[in-house]
Every structure is written in C-alpha cells, then in structure tokens.
Amino acid sequence: MIEMLNVYKKYPNGITAANGLSVRIEQGEFVYVVGPSGAGKSTFIKMIYREERASKGTIKVGDFDLITMRDKQVPYLRRHVGVVFQDYKLLPRLTVYENIAYAMEVVEKNPRMIKKRVLEVLDLVGLKHKVRMFPTELSGGEQQRISIARAIVNMPRVLIADEPTGNLDPDTSWEIMNILDEINRQGTTIVMATHNSQIVNVMKHRVLAVENGRIVRDELGGDYGYEG
C-alpha cells in the first residue's frame, strides 16, 4: 500500500530531513512514527500525501507514483489519502455538517449520498447531535473528532494523522485514539506521527522510529522508546 525506497528530502536551507528512507506499509496496518523533534517525522508524513516532494528515491501509495506525479494529479491522490492535523484546520464559517460535506462536494458526490455519509461518520465519532454547530462552539476534542470525520468521509484507504492528540488533554486523547482504532479495524491503513509515549506504549501497533532522517527502528508492537 505504501512503499518508500531510498528516499531523500533536502530542503533549500541545506537540511536533509529524509536520508535514505526505505519502508513498506501494508494495507490495514496501524503504524506510529516516533522520534525526537527535528528527526524528520513530519517530512516522512507529508511525503506520503505529497505535501512535500522527495528530492529523489521512490514513493508509491497504491497505484500512485508520488515522484513522477504531476501537481495536477495530487487531488486524485488525496481522494485515497485522508489527513488529520494537530490544529484541526476546520473552516470556521461552516457548520459541522458543512465542514464534512465540503470534502465530498469537491469530488462531486451527489447530495443524497453526501447527507447519508456525513451522518454516518458523525455517528462514528459520536457527534451527530452537534451537526448544526460551528467549530468555535466545540471543544478541542470535538473539533478533532470532526476533523477525523472529514478525513474519512470519502472512505480513503489511508489515513495520515500528524500529532492528532498534540493539543488535547489525556482523557480526550484516549477518545480520539479509540476512534482511530475503530477506523483501522474497518480496514483503513493509519500512519500516525506522535510524541505521546503513553499511547504508543499502551495501544500497541507497529513503531517506526525516525532519527536524523533515517528509520532506526521498525518494531511490531514496539514501545515509544524515548525519554522525556
């Protein structure tokens, strides 16, 4: 499903954020990406949905070749790859329903299908009763749940989660993780960058540890492995 081979990413300022990355992630896996700040986790994550373009190497997500892909093809990739951000990125002037529906409208789904699917994902994240509210009327945890609902509304095969619990209190973080776990059980591949050692150590999944742009540990059911 996701394959990287000898991937390098060098930024114009001279920083090398990916230094020969090679990894394969199969359909249906749940993978944590861990490591110290500045290790290259965000670059690793962003290259999967082509927010960042690799300098050289091979990256494939399903049938998409992200190295040779033209920019105009990126929206088609993102129909298959959902993204959840630390800071939610909801549209403040749209209601909960409209925020989620927008993701389907841009790919021209029919209105009847949109209504049915939006209510389905709101039910999954437990916020069907907040359908008419605006983002500013929600707690941080609720906003993140709406962000997840929006990311999965088009039924992507891959869900990228970049520090999804970073701005949340511990109880809310566990609620978010339970939702992600359920999405994974339904067959969606999840790749999650995180600094939350407790979550990684309790909810066991595959762990990729990144340091200096390299994968230094690839462990099934591994621990977080960093202090502090």
Image: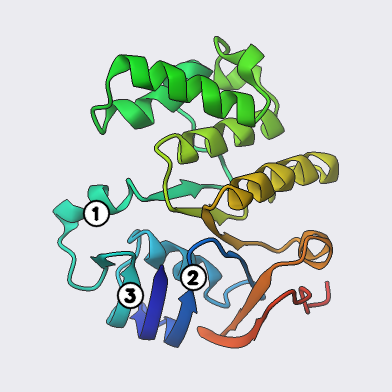
In the depicted structure, whether residue 163 falls above or below residue 1: above
- Is 196 displayed left or right of 211 in the figure? right
Q: Amino acid at mark 2?
A: Glu
Q: Quadrant of residue 104?
A: top left
Mark 1 lies on residue: 74
Mark 3 lies on residue: 59
Q: Amino acid at mark 3?
A: Ile
Residue furthest to the top: 132
In the rendered image, residue 124, in percent from the top left (x then y), is placed at 62, 31
Residues at marks 1 and 3, CA–CA distance in whole angstroms: 14 Å
Give the number of the mark in front: 2 or 1: 2
In terms of secondary structure, where does tag 1 sit? Answer: helix
Q: Quadrant of residue 223?
A: bottom right
In the depicted structure, whether residue 110 falls above or below residue 162: above
Residue at 48 percent of width and 34 percent of height: 150
In the rendered image, residue 54, in percent from the top left (x then y), is placed at 31, 75
Neighbor class of circle 1 (other Cα within 10 Å; few <14, some 14-19, many 20+) is some
Neighbor class of circle 3 (other Cα within 10 Å; few <14, some 14-19, many 20+) is many
Neighbor class of circle 2 (other Cα within 10 Å; few <14, some 14-19, many 20+) is few
Residue at 60 percent of width and 20 percent of height: 136
Mark 2 lies on residue: 26
In the rendered image, residue 31, in percent from the top left (x then y), is placed at 60, 67
- Is 81 displayed left or right of 119 in the figure? left
Q: Are the two marked residues, 2 and 1, in contact with CB atoms closer than 8 angstroms?
A: no
Residue at 58 percent of width and 24 percent of height: 122
Q: Where's the C terminus, which quadrant?
A: bottom right
| Coloring basis for residues | rainbow
Q: Are the two marked residues, 3 and 2, in contact with CB atoms closer than 8 angstroms?
A: no
